[in-house]
Amino acid sequence: MRTPMLVNTAAFATTVAVAVALSNGPAMADEHTFEKVVPAVVGTTTTPHHVPVGEDGRSTQTATVEERVKKVIADQLEVPEDRVVNTASLTEDLGADDLALSELALALEEEFGIRIPDEDIDSFTTVQSVIDLVEGKLA
């Protein structure tokens, strides 16, 4: 199934302007004009009928979240990405203190568009605990 993907307000405004121009009308375009123009202007994407699964049997979408969380952790704690393994302790192995954990929570909120209350920061013990929290918030 192919569906239109609106990427931003500017693209939508362009779509409307083109649709109106193609309709030869002063300010109105019918739905058929939009069906032809929207995919041409903003592109299309294929909606998967299943959730892709990686070699480990986990959703590749989850793996993407995991990779993004690990990148944020590495960036925020200023450690090499190869040290950010699931079992690593944020404090003992990666050197995070309370301030660093608070800044990590803010960075994760920005990266994923989620809210992490202060009390959830207390659950940040290992890299996996952070991944689990983010995946739970996104579910």
Image (cartoon, grey):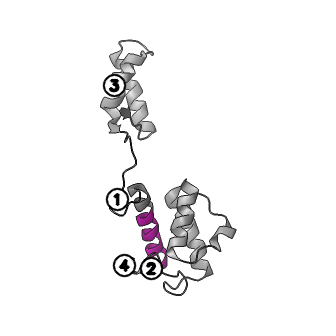
Left or right: residue 6 versus residue 96 is: left
N-term mark: 1 or 4: 1
What's the amino acid at mark 1?
Answer: Gly
What's the amino acid at mark 2?
Answer: Glu
Q: Which of the two marks, 1 or 3, is nearer to us in this view?
A: 1
Which residue is situated farthest in the left direction here? 40
What's the amino acid at mark 4?
Answer: Asp
Residue located beneath label 3 in the image: 37
Q: CA distance from mark 4 to mark 3?
A: 46 Å
Residue located beneath label 2 in the image: 78
Q: Which of the two marks, 2 or 1, is nearer to us in this view?
A: 1
- Circles 1 and 3, Cβ within 8 Å, touching? The answer is no
- Circles 3 and 2, Cβ within 8 Å, touching? The answer is no
Q: CA distance from mark 4 to mark 2?
A: 12 Å
Which of the pair 30/61 is nearer the observer?
61
Which residue is situated farthest in the front direction here? 57
Whether residue 78 appears in magenta in the rendering, the answer is yes
Circle 3 — which element?
Answer: helix
In the image, what residue occupies the spot 36% across and 14% down? Answer: 23
Residue numbers of the magenta segment:
66-79
Magenta part, dominant SS: helix
In the image, what residue occupies the spot 49% across and 86% down? Answer: 93
